[in-house]
Amino acid sequence: MRTQVAIIGGGPAGLLLSQLLHVNGIDSVILERKTRDYVLGRIRAGVLEQGLVRLMEEAGCAGRMHAEGFSHDGALISYGSEMFRIDFAEHTGTPVLIYGQTEVTRDLYDAREKAGGRIEFEVDDVVIRDADTDRPHVQYTRNGTARRIDCEFVAGCDGFHGVSRQAIPLTVRREYEKIYPFGWLGVLSETPPVNHELIYANSERGFALCSMRNDHLSRYYIQCSLSDSPADWTDEAFWEELKRRIPKAQADTLVTGPSIEKSIAPLRSFVTEPMRWGRLFLCGDAAHIVPPTGAKGLNTAASDVHYLYNALREYYRDGSEAGIDAYSERALARVWKAERFSWWFSSLLHRYPDQSAFDLKMQLADLEFLRANKAAQQAMAENYVGLPY
Ligand code: APR
Ligand code: PHB
């Protein structure tokens, strides 16, 4: 098989890149380890920056997003007996869109299939060959049969546990990592959201988040121990703990119900440098991971895709290599800002096992300053709604 761009990974990054290349007349093939249904079964955050919305519009995939998504102009932060609002409209003039990332992925799959896009599902043994030459190729198996794709470029969109990152030699690759000493226990319930905007809660018992997918599907999280498993938490225990961590007014009006999904996610900050090696380009979780606090995972994958698809369009349309040569530096400049915001927001809201009394006072001072200072709120709002590409 031959294509211009071989894309490893059929998650949101790989799908968005493939569709944007397609609308610009550039051919690609996606190699995905799982089935489409398996990929769509992953529950992921639902806060989209305008940059991602614009990319979906460019890709011709934004119809359902605009019809079913909810525009949010602010979010709430609670601590102790306080709760205050960060007004995105006042500070940035930019909203965020509440729309499940699973739905983004579904819209992209539908668009690729409508366009006759080539997606190989249930592939195994993917190996990138000769990425440091101008004739790379990808070997893989499917149904036990060895296969090969000859291409001009390879996009590694295969997530944190993929193979693409490993194709960059350790002599070239630098990795940066921070593991957080807690996880997020998340519950999806067919109940009305407790509040029309998201509530991020710092409580003495730990972090909690009240989010939603739509007005009859709510998403809640509580910080939990890494030694916990979902089976350790009955629905009742989850709801009672959530109520202890959010303001009383919301705890008293919280509509509870059976969990239709319950899972625990570990938290990690991670960056690989560089994000390019020869004709291999890393995008999304293959190159970087953020704690979900700032909902920057998909939104940072989106800016990677923006830089890469424009670079490839420039190469094929103008014969210029300027964009592909600048890709890693451009992408990393925004990645590190998203890493910083996600780390800072996580430090602001979570209780850390080794926090000293002084550390707690610093966290409280940070919250007090954010509550009282418009400049601090503007800085937070600009990061939350998404820094420019
Ligand atoms: N071969 C082929 N496919 C692979 C391989 C492999 N060796 N390894 C992983 N994959 C596939 C996975 O099955 C998955 O569908 O690559 C895809 C990677 O998708 P994600 O992990 O969702 O990563 P990405 O597309 O970068 O999405 C970034 O989107 O869903 C949000 O918040 C989430 O941060 C994440 C962001
Ligand atoms: C979610 O709805 O899953 C969500 C929302 C905001 C976050 C993280 C997760 O910061």
Image: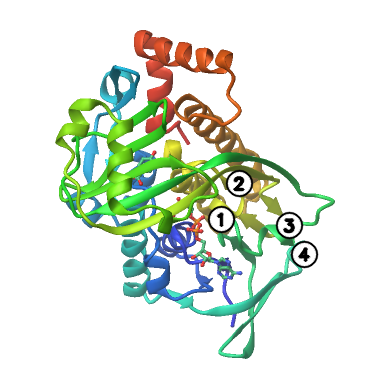
Image coordinates of residue 196 in percent, x first then y, are: 18, 35
Which of pointers 4 and 2 lies earlier in the amino acid sequence? 4
Instruction: Depth check: give the residue in front, 27 or 138.
Output: 138
Q: Hey, which quadrant is residue 162 in on the image?
A: bottom right
Residue beneath disc 3:
278
C-alpha gap between disc 3 and disc 4: 7 Å
Image coordinates of residue 154 in percent, x first then y, are: 63, 64
Classify 10 Å Cα crowding around label 4: few (below 14), some (14-19), many (20 and above).
some
Classify 10 Å Cα crowding around label 3: few (below 14), some (14-19), many (20 and above).
some
Q: Which mark is residue 72?
A: none
Residue beneath disc 4:
133
Residue beneath disc 2:
323
Image coordinates of residue 1 in percent, x first then y, are: 59, 83
Residue beneath disc 1:
312
Can residue 199 be seen at all in this image of the molecule?
A: no
Amino acid type for the residue under numbered disc 1: Leu
C-alpha gap between disc 4 and disc 2: 18 Å
Which of pointers 2 and 1 lies earlier in the amino acid sequence? 1
Residue 277 as seen in the image, left or right of residue 243: right
- The correct choice, above or below, for 379 with respect to 28 in the image is above
Report the mark closest to the observer, 3 or 1.
3
Q: Are marks 3 and 4 in contact (CB under 8 Å)?
A: yes
Q: Are marks 2 and 1 in contact (CB under 8 Å)?
A: yes
Q: Hey, which quadrant is residue 105 in on the image?
A: bottom left
C-alpha gap between disc 3 and disc 1: 14 Å
Image coordinates of residue 239 in percent, x first then y, are: 28, 44
Residue 328 as seen in the image, left or right of residue 38: right
Which of pointers 1 and 4 lies earlier in the amino acid sequence? 4
Amino acid type for the residue under numbered disc 2: Gly
Which of pointers 3 and 1 lies earlier in the amino acid sequence? 3
Classify 10 Å Cα crowding around label 1: few (below 14), some (14-19), many (20 and above).
many
Q: Are marks 3 and 1 in contact (CB under 8 Å)?
A: no
